[in-house]
Image (tube, rainbow, N blue to C red):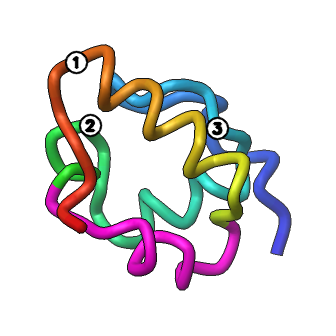
Amino acid sequence: MSTRHLPARIGDLPPIGRPATGALLEAGITTLAQVATHSRTELLAMHGIGPKAIRILSDALTENGLNFSD
């Protein structure tokens, strides 16, 4: 499935690439606060989210005083 129709960025999430953005959108996740309610393992299990997206999300969470749930 093509992800070209997806925005490069949503909500307050950092740019993590369209496949990862699509995975988060499909899961209903559009904010860093929502990301923080999930573990790294849960997010990595989503098709389209890989280690690079997790690193970017982790940095953004830290900058905003948040952490993954694990």
Q: Quadrant of the C terminus?
A: bottom left
Residue that appears at 64% across and 38% down: 16
Magenta part of the protein: which range? 37-48
Label 2 sits on what residue type? Leu
Q: Residues within 10 Å of mark 3 (few under 14, many from 20)?
A: many
Q: Which mark is residue 30?
A: none
Determine the CA span between mark 3 and mark 2: 12 Å
The number of discs equals 3
User: Taking 34 as reference, is 16 left or right?
Assistant: right
Q: Quadrant of the N terminus?
A: bottom right
Looking at this view, is 5 or 11 the one in front?
A: 11
Label 3 sits on what residue type? Ile
What residue is shown with label 1? 64
- In primary-sequence order, the first of circles 3 and 1 is 3
Looking at this view, is 49 or 55 the one in front?
A: 55
Mark toward the viewer: 2 or 1: 1
Label 1 sits on what residue type? Asn
- Say if mark 2 contacts mark 1, CB within 8 Å: yes
Helix, strand or loop under label 2: helix
What residue is shown with label 2? 32
What residue is shown with label 3? 16
